[in-house]
Amino acid sequence: MIGTLELALLSPVEPDIAARHATRVTARDTSGSFTVLPGHADFVAALVPCLLEWTDATGTIHYAGVPGGILRVAGGNRVEVMARRHYTGDSPASVASALRGDMGSARAADDMRRLALDRLEAEIAGQLARRLAAGSA
């Protein structure tokens, strides 16, 4: 479509098979929110967790929650959002709820990995202490 952007939401977990055409895409990086319009210069941005918005040719606003990722504009008419996951929805509230749930799960998994690493480090420290004690005896 002329005067539109092709939007692709890319994720290793949920492949994007639907072509989306947008008249604008709004996202957020560490410097704040920004909007991409057709003909935008090519660039890459590191996204923070945000609610991605795009408007289709009918003026309907669509939403996707991304827990951070990379946004790339290519050729002035293609926007690719690469994220670990994305959550699309009809309202910001439904997307935000799913995103919060995923981020909570990710935090719990990180806590479990941290605990396992702490246990491993304690075991290594104990082994070193025993070797040092055995060597000084």
Image (tube, helix red, strand yellow):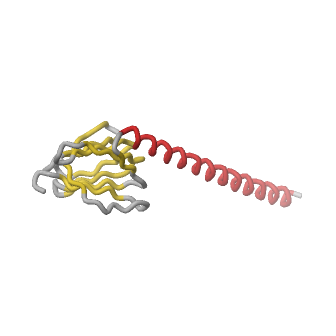
Residue at image location 23% in from the left, 42% down from the top: 35
Q: Is residue 90 left or right of residue 7?
A: right
Q: Position of residue 27 (x, y in %)?
A: 30, 43
Residue at image location 58% in from the left, 51% down from the top: 109
Is 15 rendered above or below residue 36? below
Residue 50 found in image quarter: top left
Q: Is residue 35 left or right of residue 129?
A: left
Is 44 rendered above or below residue 49? below
Q: Position of residue 115 (x, y in %)?
A: 66, 50
| Residue located farthest toward the right when viewing the structure as drawn | 137
Which part of the image, by quadrant, shows the N terminus? bottom left
- In this orientation, which residue lies closer to the viewer: 21 or 136? 21
Residue at image location 23% in from the left, 53% down from the top: 73
Residue 90 found in image quarter: top left
Q: Position of residue 48 (x, y in %)?
A: 38, 43
Q: Is residue 92 left or right of residue 100?
A: left
Residue at image location 53% in from the left, 44% down from the top: 104
Which part of the image, by quadrant, shows the C terminus? bottom right
Q: Position of residue 4 (x, y in %)?
A: 15, 52
Task: State how many labels appear.
Answer: 0
- In this orientation, which residue lies closer to the viewer: 116 or 13? 13
